Amino acid sequence: MTALDAVSVYTPAFRVPIEDLADPLDLTDIQVRLFRRFHGLDQVRFAPDRSPAELLRAAVEGLAGLRGQEHRVRYVVHGRAMPVVVPYPHNPLHDVCRQLGLGHALAFTVTQQSCASGLLAVELAGRLLAGDPHEDALALVLTGEKAFTRHARLIPGTSLFGEGASACLVSADGPRDRMLSFVCAQRGEFDGEYGDREEEFQRQYRPSLAEVINRAVADAGLALDDIRLVLPHNVNVVTWQRLCSLMDFPVQRVLLSNVPDNGHLFCTDAFANYRTARERDLLREGDHYLVATVGAGAGATFSAMVFQH
Amino acid sequence: MRLVRAGRRAFTGNADVLADDDHRAQVTDYFADLVRPFGAGPVTDLSGQSYGEMAKALVAEVVPAAEPVDLLVLAFSIHDVWPGRATATYLSHVCPGTPMSFAVCDQGSASPFTGLRVIGDYGVRRALLVVVEQGALPYESAAATPLAHRGVAMLYEEGAGTRATEVRQYPDVVPEAVPELARRGVAELSTGHPGARVVLSDSLAAVWPDHPDHTRVPAGQPMTGVWWHLAGASEDAVLVGDYDRDLRYLCFAVVAADQSSVD
């Protein structure tokens, strides 16, 4: 059973109040106030001095569990929201692998599920490990990217993206944080080819997310009330408040404290929220928790994953 | 998994989406922001292809409505001219079966082999591998680009049938180490398929002087080269091999007659 053996997160210390993003993102005062008062955003993290490769490297260097185990890493999978982040043929992923003694691993990026690509990377890593002949094989799942252009910094009326990165050591049968289920539903009908369907997407957002959460919980053999904690994507606070209302789930069991502190860190939210949960001792041995995310942009992907800690 | 159907197609001209002024403006801004930290600038005349448009045509050619797909993997190296699009998610909508879909990239010519490996690991009933490349970069660049816009789609099915697949991938292989590993890879994959036609990319043949008799794929199409040949092959067994000299991946796959169907 796929398991998370260790998780490291790099969140830059540098943070920008959302009011300072008004000019670069062409936001009106009303839009900024909406983000602050309604969506619960406050500051967004950026790493202006770090390149894409340096972001990833910062996360890997914090992964103490990797040291001395590099030779066991057979796969490095970068789960990335934005499909194109550097000019061709630059390759930050392989640069980092070579710098950190992981050049022997099969390294690649999975993408085009937007912010749901991070959970996909974990699931995919588990499948590769399950099919690997080496019993002690490990996979390293990375997330992290730059908010380098307006398209990558803003979901109009919904969220603001920041920068951060994570590194997660995955094993095929580890003892900690075992993955019990994964459900993914893709909605390509919201692609830009079909015109502006924003209103319809907003109508379907919460019911669609609720559906994959319920299916993931059921696939894990659990009831929703068995979920000790939900680790959300940091899209905003109000979305999760309304989702909890829809699902009759206590919002106090959704870890939302990083939304005002970080902004939406692409695929990194899940891992950053996991680290926060561990640091605050919110997960006890045996607890079940759920990670959920929506990859939105051109098309939409709703994903949920249940773990036992 | 067995290969049940394959299609290949070359595309000319620019993506239809580039006729849209709003789209052109958006992606021009995107590419300008993309290359600025690298000291480059955008080109004034945007051209190139969209993998969504290319793959949609290939899906229509290869996947009948009565054969719903469970998994779709899009493999590419050079990006297209719709850089922010979740193209695989879009393809999930246009492909029969609304399959789980994602893209594999940043691995040079190894990406299609990884896609094939992933398809095997998922163990689904039916999966589609789409390999695409297009030949234009919308910014100043000295990088070599493919000679033509081309795509290959391969539909694989679980169970007994006419063709089966196996993959071998070797990371971090320097050119001097290619011959020994290549001999091993071909020997392993040829077991049980003694008559397999060997198809090698130009880049692999160049660093493997004592290579076996093979069909050498012309240079200029680093992603689709060997797969283009596979999609057009009539042989019962084909063994494809590729080498990415920049990223140092050596990869082989055999698509061969399934013994259960031969009997």
Image (cartoon, helix red, strand yellow):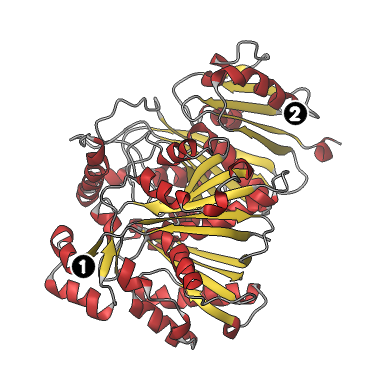
Mark 2 belongs to chain = B
> Picture coordinates of residue A169 (x, y %)?
56, 54
Whether B150 is drawn above or below A64: the answer is: above
Are there few (<14), some (14-19), or many (20+) residues within 10 Å of tag 2? Answer: some
Q: Residue furthest right?
A: B263
Side (left or right) of A239 relative to B29: right
Say which residue appears at 58% left-offset and 40% top-offset.
Answer: B114
* Rendered image: mark on residue B43: none
The residue beneath circle 2 is: B188
Q: How many marks?
A: 2
Between marks 2 and 1, how big is the CA–CA gap?
Answer: 59 Å
In-front residue for pair B36/A247: B36
Q: Residue at x 23, y 48 (%)?
A: B20
User: In screen coordinates, is B35 left or right of A218?
Assistant: left
**Looking at the image, which residue is at 59% across and 37% down?**
B113
User: Label 1: which residue?
Assistant: A17
Q: Residues within 10 Å of mark 1 (few under 14, many from 20)?
A: some
Q: The disc labelled 2 sits on which kind of residue?
A: Glu
Helix, strand or loop at label 1? It is strand
Apparent side of residue B125 relative to residue A46 in the rendered image (left or right): right
Residue B116 spot, x, y in % from top left: 61, 41
Estimate the x, y position of residue A163 in percent, counting from the top left: 33, 57
Would residue A264 be visible to someone looking at this image? yes
Depth check: give the residue in front, A1 or B86.
A1
